[in-house]
Image (cartoon, rainbow, N blue to C red):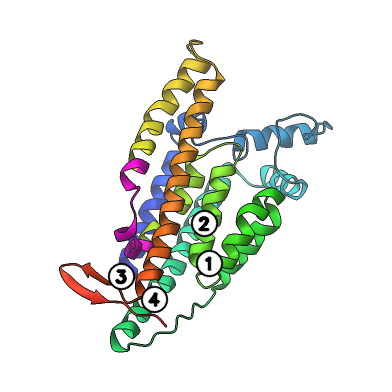
Amino acid sequence: MKKQWLSNFLLAGTIRFLLMNSGYQRIITDRVEVSTALNSWKRVTEGIYLYNIGIDPYAGDLFHETPIGLYVFNFIQQYLPQWVLFSLFVFTDLLTALLLAFTAKEYATELVSKRKEEKSSDENTENYDTSIVSTTMIWLFIASFQINVGLLYIVPLALRLRHDPMLLAFSYLAIAAIFKSYPCIGDVGFYVSLLPLWKHLFQYTRQGFIVGCFMLFCTVFAPTVWYQWIYARSANANFYFGVTLAFAIAQIFLLTDILFASLKHEFAIRHGINKDLSESTAKLLLE
């Protein structure tokens, strides 16, 4: 298992590094689905240049990083060669993937142990341990997000999902991606990669086909209307804005479907409802 992990990490890091040093790097950088005003490295370098020549980078709508981030990126830009900078990006991506993998493994192990307890005893008291990673993620998110979203979503979800911090963190990440000013594949891919953790809830979901169709539609039409708006001049911003709305709706359907599936699963366990799993009948109990 460790050898497989190591080989996967080496392969991913190599592909990432080669792409950053190839001709595809500029193509990917210019794609609006990948690079936005909030995560564009090009905007960071332009903001650093303005800062070094004495112009306030926050005067316009170019630079969106924090002042601390400005100083850090300025130091990196001045003292690190390009290959070290690229290696730092690759290392950060791999470290993020590693932390996610460890967190997912711990959560999956916890779910398996709970299911074994359910099979061996009719009485089951659910006790979810809050991991350091998920707790830190949750409270940093609460401190940094908008007040209106916090009142409407953060507090109710925190009260309802207080016993399942991983599902709570997943919900917060999805809400952040939905309400972000500039939709990005990276934000969506980050929380979608956690979906296999709730494979046991898929039997209760009902909107998979709709979400899939929405995602496919947006994947095809987003670059099409962007080209018509920016290059062909045969459309306007409303066309692309409509696709982003559809993309947000697809994510809303996905999030609500997972949350309702969690409630159905909890209801089934609490009331001892039989559920046919893999051609065998299982009885889930919760007191």
How crowded pointer 1 is (Cα within 10 Å; few <14, some 14-19, many 20+) is rated as: some
Please name the residue that numbered disc 4 is placed on.
270
Give, as a three-letter code, the residue at label 3.
Met
- Disc 2 vs disc 4: which is toward the camera? 4
Real-space Cα separation, disc 2 to disc 4, in angstroms:
23 Å
- Disc 3 vs disc 1: which is toward the camera? 1
Task: Tell me residue 233's x, y (percent).
Answer: 51, 10
- Disc 2 vs disc 3: which is toward the camera? 2
Quadrant of the frame with the C terminus: bottom left
Q: Earlier in the sequence, mark 3 or mark 1?
A: 3
Real-space Cα separation, disc 2 to disc 3, in angstroms:
30 Å
- Disc 1 vs disc 2: which is toward the camera? 1
Please state which of residues 49 and 69 is positioned toward the viewer in this rendering.
69
What span is colored magenta in the figure? 197-211
What residue is drawn where x is 50% and y is 53%? 93
Please name the residue that numbered disc 3 is placed on.
1
- Secondary structure, mark 3, is loop
Please name the residue that numbered disc 2 is placed on.
171
Real-space Cα separation, disc 3 to disc 4, in angstroms:
36 Å
Q: Is residue 50 above or below residue 209?
A: above
Give, as a three-letter code, the residue at label 1.
Leu
Please name the residue that numbered disc 1 is placed on.
161
Q: Is residue 30 visible?
A: yes
Q: Earlier in the sequence, mark 2 or mark 4?
A: 2
Is-magenta flag for residue 111?
no
